[in-house]
Structures are given as structure tokens and as C-alpha cells.
Image: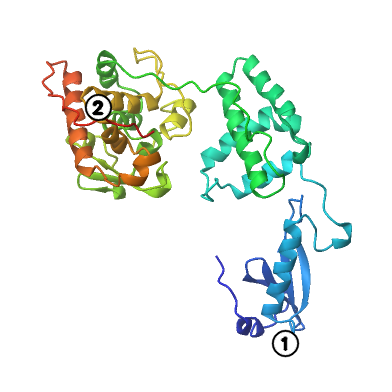
């Protein structure tokens, strides 16, 4: 990122054989001609537009200095936010934006309600859901004219084609985009603010039985790297994308720290590595040859999809990599570990009252749970008599999703 120019730095800019432009601060630029003339330039996107425009703020002088230029930019920015193009103020407010305009702006900014940057995979989900089922029908409508009566038939059509889960995904994403428009006062309120969902999300409920775990463990796929990733998901309970993106530099002794940029909770998460887990760590990072697994499984292993694990050599019903994570959580529950400990092991976000008052990091409990699950897993794999002594719950627990 270019550093800001001070007023003195602007004055010291030298002429060149051709005209050139330098960033001064944010949207403010200065243009320098071969004859030494310097002009303030404001770069902006007009209301309802997508193309960046340039607007002259006058020649750089003792009167029209840097401070004066910033005052003009503040004025023109306020005009843009109110729907007026500062280059053509006599035209008054630009046309009301369409849903397509708002959606484009939402995708461009790519932030959640708190202003945090959304992941590329999340934005792709918005794009796939809305561009298929909403934009073709409502994209050209003014967003201020959209009502529930326009939205409900679209969602019902998705349900009728047998995609109830997809209907709920469309509902949630469209609701967020309209809330985005309301937060910027493009509309007074979202027509979906008090609208109930149409369709439902089917919660994953597949976990491997003990017999299936043994079959899975004995399976030898074409890709050794894919096998390591799948086994580590089952051993650690980490998310598929977190495991697939593991780097040797993230490991320190018995602990693996998932960095904030790869953590779903947007906080660093520490995972205890048992001796069994250490047998499957990457030399540097995991690399799956394209010829070794199908594209769907590749996407699932990198956290970009929920593809089913299917290989002719694997004698098991379909399951997705995330089911291995669920299997580990279920196993810890069977060993009588509390929901708080299970959530801490798997890096789930604390919510509600728990998030406010319970600041304990559960590091010791995570280690104990990981080691107990490792012993349990070895027992299942070997088929020997279970000699793991379950730990007793000491208090009533509240699950933090």
C-alpha cells in the first residue's frame, strides 16, 4: 500500500517527460504535467454505478492546498452517500439502486455485520445461491420496491423442485443482502426483517460406528496425503479445511496452533497432538495430486465443499469428511466429557452467557480429552476389549454451538 503524501511532499514532486499521478491520501490523488502543473484529483464511484470516475478539484495552490482538497472530498463524499453525483449535481439524485446494484456492492465490500472480512468461500456461497435463484427474477427491480410477495414465490419454487435446504440458504443470504441495504439507508427497512424461513436446513447426523471406524482405518486410498488428512480429522476433531491447510510451522511440540486467518471462529485455536496424531503430520504441508482423488473429494478435504467420500475400495456407506469430526465429538460425549470441553477441543465459538462469563481456555481439559479419545480410537482400531474408564460429568452443561 502506498504511503500518504504530505503537503510538502506534493510540492516537491518533480516533473517528468510525461504526465503522471500519485496517491496522496485515500481517494485523493495529484496529477503532475510535464510543464509542472499540479492538479488535485478525486477518484470515486457514482451512486448506482460500478465504474470509478475522476474529478478535478483544481490546481494545487497556496489557497487550494491539501486541507482545502480534503474539505472538498468530504463534501462530495456526503453527496455521493445521499445519491447525488458531485460531477452532475443538477441531475439530483441518481436512480434508485436495483437489487443487482446492491448485490454487487455487497460482494465488493465483502464484510459481515461487524465489518469483518468474509471468506472467499462464503462469498462464493452468496454468488451461487443468489445468481441462480434470485437475481434472474428480481435483479432489475428497484430494491426499495421489493416486498415479501416478490420473495416468497421464489423460495417456494426452490422448495418445490426438491431443494428445501437450498431454499433456506437462499433465504439467509438474501436476507443478509437486504439487511446490508437497510444498514446503508438505501431502504428504510428490509422486507425480510420479520419474515420466517421457507425450507429447512438438514442438520448433518452421520457419524461412523465403531465397526465403520475400523473399516475406514484399514482402507488404503490412492492418495497417501488424503488418507493422512482424513485420519487427522478423526483423531483431532479439527475441521477438514483446517487439517488440509496444516503447515509444519504451525506445530510447536505437542500443540498445533490454527492461525486466525484459517480459523472459522476468526481466533487462533490450539489443538493437542497425541502420539497417534503425530504419525500423520505433513513434512511441510499437504499436497494432494490431482490424479489421486476426484474433484469433489478434493474440495471437501480443503474445506470448500461437503462432498461424499467415495472410493470403490472403501466398503462403507457414503460419508463426508466433516462426519469424521462429528464422530470424534460423539466419541468424546460417550466418554462422558462435558459439552464445554468438546466445544473447546473442536474450536467452537462460545455463545450467550457462557461467552460473557466463562473465560476459561480449557487447555488442560483439551489435552486430557484428546488423549482419552486417542486411547479409545486405538481400542476400536485394534478390536481389543475396551478398557477406557469414562470420566464422570461434574456439572450440568450447556452446549455452545
Res 215 seen here: yes
Q: Does the image show residue 351? A: no
Dot 1 lies on which element?
Answer: loop
Name the residue at 41% across, 31% down.
Answer: 301
Which tag, 1 or 2, sits closer to the chain's start? 1
Which residue: 57% across, 34% down?
A: 125
Q: Is residue 105 above or below residue 88?
A: above
Seen from this angle, which residue lies furthest right? Answer: 90
| Residue 217 drawn at (x, y percent) | 26, 21
Q: Which residue is disc 1 drawn over?
A: 62
Q: Quadrant of residue 389?
A: top left
Element type at mark 2: helix
Q: Nearer the viewer, residue 5 or 361?
A: 361
Residue at image position (44%, 26%) is 297
Of the pair 113 and 223, the residue shown nearer to us = 113
Gap in Å between the C-alphas at discs 1 and 2? 72 Å
Residue 40 located left or right of residue 115: right
Camera-near label (1 vs 2) is 2
In the rendered structure, the answer to whether residue 371 lies left or right of residue 35 reads left
For this view, does 260 lie left or right of residue 168?
Answer: left
In the figure, residue 289 lies in which quadrant? Answer: top left
| Residue of label 2 | 332
Above-or-below relation of 71 to 101: below
Residue drawn at x 36%, y 48% is 259
Amino acid at each position: 500500500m502506498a504511503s500518504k503524501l504530505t503537503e510538502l511532499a506534493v510540492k516537491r514532486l518533480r516533473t517528468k517527460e510525461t504526465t503522471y499521478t500519485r496517491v496522496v491520501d485515500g481517494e485523493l490523488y495529484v496529477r503532475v504535467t510535464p510543464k509542472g502543473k499540479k492538479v488535485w484529483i478525486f477518484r470515486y464511484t457514482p451512486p448506482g454505478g460500478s465504474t470509478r470516475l475522476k474529478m478535478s478539484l483544481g490546481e494545487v495552490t497556496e489557497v487550494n492546498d491539501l486541507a482545502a482538497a480534503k474539505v472538498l472530498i468530504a463534501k462530495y463524499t456526503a453527496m455521493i452517500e445521499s445519491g447525488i453525483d458531485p460531477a452532475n449535481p443538477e441531475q439530483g439524485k441518481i436512480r434508485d439502486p436495483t437489487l443487482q446494484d446492491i448485490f454487487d456492492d455487497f460482494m465488493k465490500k465483502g464484510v459481515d455485520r461487524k465489518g469483518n472480512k468474509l471468506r472467499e468461500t462464503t462469498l462464493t456461497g452468496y454468488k451461487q445461491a443468489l445468481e441462480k435463484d434470485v437475481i434472474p427474477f428480481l435483479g432489475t427491480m428497484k430494491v426499495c420496491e421489493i416486498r415479501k410477495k416478490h420473495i416468497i414465490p421464489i423460495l417456494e419454487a426452490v422448495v418445490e423442485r426438491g431443494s428445501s435446504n437450498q431454499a433456506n440458504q437462499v433465504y439467509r443470504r438474501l436476507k443478509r443482502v437486504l439487511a446490508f441495504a437497510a444498514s446503508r439507508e438505501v431502504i428504510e427497512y428490509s422486507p425480510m426483517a420479520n419474515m420466517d424461513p421457507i425450507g429447512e436446513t438438514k442438520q448433518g447426523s452421520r457419524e461412523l460406528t465403531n465397526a465403520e471406524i475400523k473399516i475406514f482405518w484399514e482402507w488404503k486410498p490412492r492418495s497417501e496425503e488424503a488418507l493422512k488428512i482424513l485420519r487427522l480429522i478423526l483423531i483431532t476433531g479439527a475441521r477438514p479445511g483446517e487439517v488440509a491447510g496444516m503447515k509444519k510451522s504451525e506445530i510447536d511440540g505437542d500443540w498445533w496452533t490454527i492461525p486466525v486467518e484459517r480459523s472459522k471462529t476468526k481466533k487462533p485455536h490450539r489443538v493437542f497432538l497425541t502420539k497417534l496424531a503425530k504419525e500423520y503430520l505433513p513434512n511441510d504441508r499437504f499436497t494432494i495430486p490431482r490424479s489421486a482423488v476426484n474433484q469433489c473429494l478434493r474440495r471437501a478435504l480443503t474445506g470448500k465443499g461437503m462432498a461424499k467420500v467415495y472410493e470403490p475400495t472403501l466398503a462403507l456407506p457414503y460419508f463426508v469428511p466433516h462426519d469424521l469430526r462429528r464422530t470424534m465429538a460423539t466419541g468424546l460425549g460417550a466418554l462422558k466429557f462435558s459439552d464445554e470441553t468438546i466445544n473447546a477441543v473442536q474450536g467452537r465459538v462460545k455463545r450467550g452467557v457462557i461467552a460473557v462469563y466463562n473465560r476459561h481456555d480449557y487447555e488442560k481439559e483439551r489435552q486430557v480429552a484428546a488423549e482419552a479419545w486417542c486411547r479409545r480410537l486405538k481400542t476400536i482400531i485394534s478390536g481389543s476389549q475396551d478398557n477406557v474408564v469414562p470420566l464422570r460429568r461434574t456439572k450440568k452443561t450447556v452446549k455452545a454451538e
